[in-house]
Image: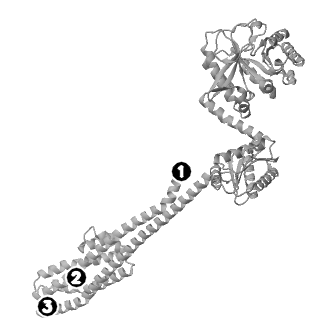
C-alpha cells in the first residue's frame, strides 16, 4: 500500500479545519435556503388557507342575503382549499405519513407544485418546534370550527329554495362561526409569522456563529503558522550557527564571537585551538559512531571546564576553538593546561575497547597588539600545529619571537604559494645531462629532469620549496605536474633518437593508489614510450615501506619504465635492501663524491657502493661531479655514469638529439 507523502499529510493537517468549516458553512447555507423556502411556501399556503375559509364564509353570507345559487358554487370552490389542506394535514399526521396523499391535498389547497415538497418537509421534520406545534394546533382548532360550515353547505345543496327564516338562521350561524374562526385564523397567522422570524433569527445566528468560528479559526491558524514559522526560523538560525553533532557553536558563530571580542581592543582576551591527538585511531577502529560519541563526550567535558563567558565551538572534524573574553595570559594558560588534563583523563570505552586520547592546544594572547580576525585565527592554528610538532599532548603559546614557530609559519606560507603556482602554472622544467664516465657516449639523450618555480620574475630551486611540499603533502601534485609536462615536451620530439629521461618521484607518490591510472592515461595521451622514462626514488622512501615500494616499482616496470635509487649511501643499512629493490641504476650520493679527493673515507665509500651495485647487477651514477679530477677518479673506480657541473649545468628542458660523448680533458666546471 502506497503511503501518502509527508508534504500531503502536513497539508491535510493544516487545511482540514478550514475544509470542515467550509463544508459546515455550505451545509448551513443549503439548510437555511431550504428552511427559508419551506417557510415561505408554508406562509403562502397559510395565506391561501385563510383566504379560502374567509371566502367560504363570505359566499355563504351572500347566498343567505340574496338567494343567488351562484354564490353556493363559489362557496364550494373556496371551501375546497381548506379541505385540501385538511386532507394533507391528516395524511402527514398519519402513521406512517402518506406524502403522496399530502401532496394531492396541498395541490387541492391551491399550493404551487414546486412549493409542496418544502411544505411537507417542514411539517414532517420541524413540527416538534414549540412555535410550529402551537401553529398547527391553531390550524387544527380553526379547522374544527370551519368544519361547521359543512352541514350548512350540505343543507343548502339539498334544498333548492330557502325561506327568509332559514336565511336569517344561516346568517346567524355564519356570524357565530366567523366570530370563532377569525381570531383563530389571525392567531395561526401571527404564530406562523413569529415562528418564521424566530427561525430566521436562529439561522442568522447560526451563520454568524459559523462565520465567527471561521474567523477565530483563521486567526488561530495564522498565529500557529507564524509561531511555527518563528520556530523554524529559530531552528534554521540555530542550525546555521551550531554543530549538529555536539550542539556547540560552529565556526561561523565562533568567528562572529571572536570578531566581537577583537573589536574591544582595550581588554585582554585569549584564543585557543584544540586538536584531538588520537581521534583518527578511534574513528578507524571503532567506526564513525565511536568517533561521534567521543566528540560528544569531549564537548561535554570541555564545556563543563570553561568559564560561563567563554565560547567553545566545534570548528570541524576533531578541532575545537575557544574564545576567552577578558582573560589574562596566566589565566588562559592555566585554563589550557586544565583542558589538556581533562582530555587526557577521559576514559573512553567502545564495544569493549578502551581508547586513550589527548589534546594539542594552541593559545594566543590577543591583548597588546591589534589582531585582525584572520591573523588571530592563523596564529591559533600555528600554535596548535606547533603543539603537535613538539610531541602532542601539550600546550603551545603563540610567540612572534619563536624561531621554530617562525619557520613553521614560513612553511605554511609555502603551501599557499605552491597551490597558487600550480593553479597559475608557474613551474618550469630544467634538465641536467647524465653522461657515460668512460667517455664512450650512448645513443639518445640521457638527462635528469629538474623542477624550478618562477616567482616575481625569479627562478627558485627545489631546495626552497620541496621541504614544505613534502611536509604538507603537496609532492604528489608536483610529481604529476612534472610528469604531465615532461611527457608533453618529450612527445613533441617524436622524430629524435629515443633517450633516457630521469624523473624524481616522492615517497608520498609511491603510496598514492591513483597514480598508476593517472600515469597510464598520461602515457597514452602523449604517445611517449615508457621505456625512455627512468624514475628516481630516494633510498629513504623506498625502504620506509619496502613491500609497497617494490609492488609499485614492479607495476611501473611492467609498463617498460626503469628505476634509479637516488641519494644512495646516506644510510648504509640500506645496502641490505639493494638486492630486493628492482632498480636499474644506483645514484651515489653527492656528499661522498664532492670530497672524495680529499677524504679517503668518502673515496672508499664511493668505491664500495660501486662494487656492491655492480655485484647486484646495477649500473652506477655519481652525482656532484664538479671537476675533471673527480671525473678521472670516478673513471678509475669504474663508475658507469656521471652527473654534475663538470659535465653540464642545468638548462631549460628541450628534448633534442643525442648528447655527445664527454672528453675529460675538455670538461668545463662553469
Give how far across and how far down residue 238 sits, in percent: 61, 55
Crowdedness near tag 1: few (<14), some (14–19) or many (≥20) residues, C-alpha within 10 Å: few
Q: Specify the label residue 5 is tagged with.
A: 1
Q: Distance between the residues labelled 2 and 1?
A: 69 Å
Q: Note whether 356 is above or below 484 in the view shown.
A: below
**Badge 3 element:** helix
> In the image shown, does 313 or 23 lie closer to the viewer?
313
Residue of label 2? 53
Quarter holding residue 95: bottom left
Give how far across and how far down residue 322 sits, in percent: 71, 52
Specify which label sits upstream in the sequence, 2 or 3: 2
Q: In percent of the image, x 85 and y 11: which residue is there?
A: 637
* 276 to the left or right of 194: right
* 238 to the left or right of 388: left
> In the image shown, does 375 or 2 lie closer to the viewer?
375
Q: In percent of the image, x 17 and y 90: which residue is there?
A: 170
Specify which label sits upstream in the sequence, 1 or 3: 1
Q: Distance between the residues labelled 2 and 3?
A: 20 Å
Q: Note whether 513 is above or below 153 in the view shown.
A: above
Give how far across and how far down residue 235 sits, in percent: 59, 56
Q: Specify the label residue 167 is tagged with.
A: 3
- The C terminus lies in which quarter of the figure? top right
> In the image shown, does 291 or 3 lie closer to the viewer?
291
- Asked if residue 333 shows in the view, the reply is yes
Amino acid at each position: 500500500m502506497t503511503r501518502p507523502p509527508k508534504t500531503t499529510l502536513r497539508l491535510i493537517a493544516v487545511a482540514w479545519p478550514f475544509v470542515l468549516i467550509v463544508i459546515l458553512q455550505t451545509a448551513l447555507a443549503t439548510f437555511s435556503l431550504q428552511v427559508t423556502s419551506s417557510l415561505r411556501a408554508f406562509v403562502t399556503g397559510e395565506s391561501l388557507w385563510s383566504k379560502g375559509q374567509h371566502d367560504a364564509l363570505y359566499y355563504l353570507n351572500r347566498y343567505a342575503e340574496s338567494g343567488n345559487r351562484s354564490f353556493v358554487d363559489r362557496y364550494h370552490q373556496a371551501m375546497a382549499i381548506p379541505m385540501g389542506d385538511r386532507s394533507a394535514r391528516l395524511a402527514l399526521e398519519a402513521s406512517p405519513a402518506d406524502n403522496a396523499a399530502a401532496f394531492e391535498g396541498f395541490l387541492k389547497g391551491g399550493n404551487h407544485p414546486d412549493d409542496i415538497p418544502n411544505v411537507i418537509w417542514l411539517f414532517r421534520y420541524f413540527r416538534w418546534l414549540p412555535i410550529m406545534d402551537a401553529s398547527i394546533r391553531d390550524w387544527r382548532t380553526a379547522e374544527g370550527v370551519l368544519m361547521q360550515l359543512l352541514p350548512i353547505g350540505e343543507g343548502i345543496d339539498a334544498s333548492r329554495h330557502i325561506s327568509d327564516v332559514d336565511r336569517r338562521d344561516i346568517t346567524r350561524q355564519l356570524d357565530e362561526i366567523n366570530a370563532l374562526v377569525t381570531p383563530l385564523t389571525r392567531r395561526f397567522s401571527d404564530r406562523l409569522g413569529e415562528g418564521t422570524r424566530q427561525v430566521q433569527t436562529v439561522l442568522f445566528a447560526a451563520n454568524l456563529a459559523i462565520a465567527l468560528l471561521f474567523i477565530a479559526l483563521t486567526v488561530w491558524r495564522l498565529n500557529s503558522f507564524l509561531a511555527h514559522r518563528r520556530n523554524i526560523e529559530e531552528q534554521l538560525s540555530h542550525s546555521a550557527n551550531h554543530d549538529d553533532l555536539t550542539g556547540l557553536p560552529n565556526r561561523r558563530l565562533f568567528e562572529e564571537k571572536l570578531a566581537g571580542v577583537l573589536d574591544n581592543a582595550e581588554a585582554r582576551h585569549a584564543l585557543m585551538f584544540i586538536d584531538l591527538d588520537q581521534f583518527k585511531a578511534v574513528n578507524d577502529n571503532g567506526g564513525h559512531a565511536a568517533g561521534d560519541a567521543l566528540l560528544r563526550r569531549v564537548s561535554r567535558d570541555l564545556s563543563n571546564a570553561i568559564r560561563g563567558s567563554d565560547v567553545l565551538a566545534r570548528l570541524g572534524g576533531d578541532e575545537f576553538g575557544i574564545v576567552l573574553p577578558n582573560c589574562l595570559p596566566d589565566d588562559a594558560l592555566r585554563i589550557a593546561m586544565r583542558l589538556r588534563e581533562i582530555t587526557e583523563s577521559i576514559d573512553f570505552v567502545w564495544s569493549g575497547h578502551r581508547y586513550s586520547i589527548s589534546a594539542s592546544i594552541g593559545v594566543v594572547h590577543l591583548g597588546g597588539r591589534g589582531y585582525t580576525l584572520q591573523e588571530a585565527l592563523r596564529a591559533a592554528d600555528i600554535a596548535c600545529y606547533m603543539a603537535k610538532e613538539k610531541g602532542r599532548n601539550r600546550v603551545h603559546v603563540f610567540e612572534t619571537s619563536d624561531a621554530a614557530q617562525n619557520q613553521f609559519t614560513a612553511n605554511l606560507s609555502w603551501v599557499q604559494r605552491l597551490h597558487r603556482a600550480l593553479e597559475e602554472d608557474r613551474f618550469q622544467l630544467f634538465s641536467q645531462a647524465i653522461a657515460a664516465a668512460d667517455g664512450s657516449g650512448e645513443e639518445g639523450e640521457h638527462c635528469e629532469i629538474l623542477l624550478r618555480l618562477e616567482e616575481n620574475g625569479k627562478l627558485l630551486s627545489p631546495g626552497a620549496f620541496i621541504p614544505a611540499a613534502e611536509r604538507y603533502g603537496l609532492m604528489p601534485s608536483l610529481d604529476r605536474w612534472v610528469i604531465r609536462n615532461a611527457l608533453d615536451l618529450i612527445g613533441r620530439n617524436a622524430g629524435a633518437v629515443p633517450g633516457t629521461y630521469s624523473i624524481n618521484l616522492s615517497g608520498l607518490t609511491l603510496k598514492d593508489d591513483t597514480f598508476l591510472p593517472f600515469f597510464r592515461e598520461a602515457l597514452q595521451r602523449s604517445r611517449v614510450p615508457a621505456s625512455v622514462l627512468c624514475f628516481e626514488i630516494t633510498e629513504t622512501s623506498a625502504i620506509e615501506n619496502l613491500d609497497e615500494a617494490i609492488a609499485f616499482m614492479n607495476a611501473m616496470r611492467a609498463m617498460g619504465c626503469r628505476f634509479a635509487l637516488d641519494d644512495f649511501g646516506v644510510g648504509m643499512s640500506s645496502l641490505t635492501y639493494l638486492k630486493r629493490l628492482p632498480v636499474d641504476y644506483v645514484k651515489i650520493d653527492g656528499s661522498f663524491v664532492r670530497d672524495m679527493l680529499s677524504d679517503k673515507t668518502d673515496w672508499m665509500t664511493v668505491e664500495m657502493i660501486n662494487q656492491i651495485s655492480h655485484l647486484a647487477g646495477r649500473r652506477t651514477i655519481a652525482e656532484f661531479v664538479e671537476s675533471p679530477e673527480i671525473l678521472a677518479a670516478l673513471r678509475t673506480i669504474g663508475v658507469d655514469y656521471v652527473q654534475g657541473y663538470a659535465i653540464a649545468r642545468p638548462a631549460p628542458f628541450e628534448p633534442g638529439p643525442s648528447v655527445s660523448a664527454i672528453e675529460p680533458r675538455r670538461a668545463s666546471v662553469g
